[in-house]
Amino acid sequence: MAHTFDELVEMQRAADQAHNRVEELRAQYGSPTQPGGWSARQTETYETAWRAWRDLARDMQGAVAEYAAETRAPRREVEEELRKQVRSSE
């Protein structure tokens, strides 16, 4: 599936938001190995957020690889330009 650069930017933003959610939950819940650990609900919430982040990041990386191949640009350069674009629009 062909992606535009703007689609890659949106995919990266979604992956970043999912990662931020995982980090928020880690900060909120503390360590799962602390005395008492996490409740079943906390574990389920965290694992769901983590899977969402993992899946979005995986899909974005695949799309970047496809875009780089289609445009014959080095993947590293595509990733660098993508990071710049995402940062500049925050």
Image (cartoon, rainbow, N blue to C red):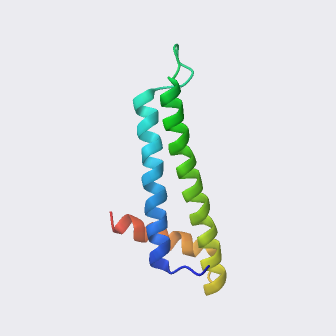
Residue 72 can be seen in this image: no
Q: How far from the left and from the top, in percent, is residue 71?
A: 61, 86
Q: How far from the left and from the top, in percent, is residue 12?
A: 48, 64
Residue 1: image quadrant is bottom right
Residue 51 can be seen in this image: yes
Say if 35 sits above or below 86 in the image.
above
| Direction bottom: furthest residue | 71
Q: Residue at position x 46%, y 51% from top? A: 18
As drawn, is 30 to the left or to the right of 2?
left
Q: How far from the left and from the top, in percent, is residue 64?
A: 59, 72
Figure quadrant of the C terminus: bottom left
Q: How many marks can you see? A: 0
Q: Nearer the viewer, residue 33 or 49?
A: 49
Q: Residue at position x 54%, y 44% from top? A: 50
| Direction left: furthest residue | 90
Say if 6 sits above or below 83 in the image.
below
Q: Residue at position x 42%, y 54% from top? A: 17
Q: How far from the left and from the top, in percent, is residue 44?
A: 53, 34
